[in-house]
Amino acid sequence: MRNAQIGLEQGVATSTAPVVLVWRLMRPRQWIKNLLIFAPLMFTDRFLHVGSWSPVITTFLAFCLLSSAVYVANDWRDRDEDRLHPKKRLRPLASGLVSLRTAGMLLSVLVMVGLALALYSGGLVLIAAALFLAVNVLYTYILKAHLFVDAFGISAGFLLRAAAGAAAIQVSFSPWLFVLVLLLTLFLAFGKRRSELRASLAPEQHRQVLGRYTAGLLDQILGVLVSSTIAVYAIYSFDQPLHAHAFMLTIPFVIYGLFRYLYLLSVNARSENPDELLVTDWPTLLNLALWGLTVLTLLFLAHPQL
């Protein structure tokens, strides 16, 4: 009886192992980047209307699947290069734990279902989703190998997320929000390069373009971007349709968040993946929660009738 139970448990573990590996290949922790899709909704009157949430949530799910498809494609292409990296060598495709055939089938399903959900959210959302895939293909095969252009390629993906969120609720994409997202995502992209450069003894072996960056150059770029991001966010906060410019109360949280990220870059290499800070660094989590609570409070105070 005992042997039979052990055999059954081993069989279940063996059958579920591929599912866990495929889930890892999809990188669900990276889906947090798609929360940017909700930004246009949060800063409009539509936020308090229940009917506006459905198309945005559907758009969010679509981009989660499409971003997973992008990660699968990237891991497929970079599997040989990833084997030289101390952490990336453990990825399912680089380690050989997931076959290329399985990855190809998963990629097809993710793209088809993701585009179908985008179409359900609206024609403009579908266009943004298609452009998102196109930009990521360009990034994988062309942009990521060029100095500075690689960071702009990453930023373009975030801009398309925000544009899709605006299209889902049929509102215009604010010019200030466009500039803010551009600056913030460039800041995170160059910060990631700074962390990768600091953590790697032979950067050009792990990422071709890394060998062309220098620590001094990246530090100067980060200094310019953090100052510009704070300035643009301050202007954007005054541009919000809330009485007495109350949205300016959120500015300190943004400044703290940017400074916290710079601190993490300077003391360790944990911030190689900026999105991981949102789920691992408790001061960042607390700061984000306080920012969100402040925004919600201001929105409800601006509409006391709701």
Image: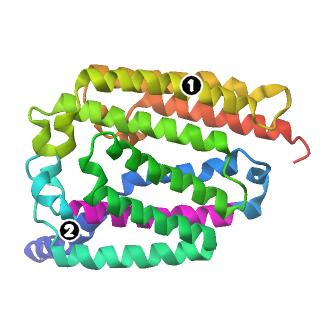
Looking at the rendered structure, the kind of residue marked 2 is Ala
On residue 17, which mark appears? 2
What residue is rendered at 17% in x and 74% in y? Answer: 100
| Range covered by the magenta-colored residues | 53-75
Q: How many marks?
A: 2
**Residue at numbered disc 1:** 230
Q: Examine the structure image and report whether residue 252 is included in the region drawn in magenta.
A: no
Q: Is residue 215 visible?
A: yes
Q: Examine the structure image and report whether residue 71 is included in the region drawn in magenta.
A: yes
Alpha-carbon span between mark 2 and mark 1:
45 Å
On residue 265, which mark appears? none
What residue is rendered at 33% in x and 63% in y? Answer: 137
The location of residue 244, given as percent across then percent down, is 84, 26
Q: Secondary structure at mark 1?
A: helix
Q: Quadrant of the N terminus?
A: bottom left
The location of residue 62, given as percent across then percent down, is 50, 67
The location of residue 58, given as percent across then percent down, is 58, 67
Q: What type of secondary structure mainly makes up the magenta span?
A: helix
Mark 2: few, some, or many residues within 10 Å (few <14, many ≥20)?
few
| Dot in front, 2 or 1 | 1
